[in-house]
Image: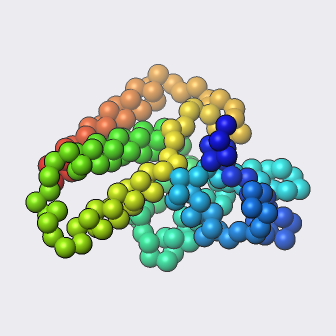
Amino acid sequence: MADDAKPLLIKRYASRRLYNTETSDYVTLEDIAAFIRAGREVQIVDLKSGDDLTRQYLLQIIAEHESRGENVLPVDVLTDLVRSYTTSAQSVVPQFLAASFEMLREGQSQMMDNWSKFPNPMASMPGFEALHRQQEAFLRSMMAGWQSTGPESDDGAEAAPATAESRARDREDLASIKKQLAELQSKLSKL
């Protein structure tokens, strides 16, 4: 297995400092964000207990970006996420998010393919190539590392079985979301 295929192991010391085991140096949250943007998987573990802290640190990175005004998540989405922790929708949210990001990745891939196949009338404008490269890099970095997740909880245990009613509702919700995303993809491809 290639080194870049394995997750980069970051160890957190009792002092809360983060240690890159590959380069044998300390790293910051911004360094970890840069690794992820470059397409690298990262795993952060507590040195003493061995607990996996990756989720905690990824959420912290997102929170820091959001607090600096780099808003990706609209307030209503954040509100719905908070609500999902206290409702029966909690079991559906991870699957919905994974399916949504998968469709976004596919749409992004199609958009990149279409962009390269057809001549763009703006291509003759000064600086267009640089802008095009930046957009491609942005889209690649935005999509890098998003993987579908299965029906397991954080601790690896299978999720509790859903009732037939909740499964039917979930399928309807997912079908509606897929339809909305397909409509968005269609609008994007017309642009």
Occupied quadrant, residue 138: bottom left
For image coordinates 66% across by 61% down, the residue present is: 57
**Image position, residue 15 (x, y; %):** 84, 71
Query: For the N terminus, which image quadrant?
Result: top right
> In the rendered image, is residue 69 in sight?
yes
Position of residue 189 relative to residue 163, above or below, is below
Q: In the image, 130: left or right of 34?
A: left
Q: Which residue lies furthest to the bottom in this view?
A: 68
Position of residue 180 relative to residue 42, above or below, is above
For image coordinates 73% across by 53% down, the residue present is: 9
Query: For the C terminus, which image quadrant?
Result: bottom left
**Image position, residue 69 (x, y; %):** 44, 76
Position of residue 84 relative to residue 131, above or below, is above
Q: Out of 92 and 187, give the one closest to the viewer.
A: 187
For image coordinates 52% across by 48% down, the residue present is: 145
**Image position, residue 124 (x, y; %):** 14, 66
The image shows a total of numbered marks equal to 0
Q: Which residue lies furthest to the right in this view?
A: 48
Q: In the image, 137: left or right of 181?
A: right
Q: Residue furthest top?
A: 164
Q: In the image, 181: left or right of 158?
A: left
For image coordinates 49% across by 77% down, the residue present is: 68
Q: In the image, 167: left or right of 119?
A: right
**Image position, residue 188 (x, y; %):** 21, 51
Colour approach in the figure: rainbow
> In the rendered image, is residue 76 in sight?
no
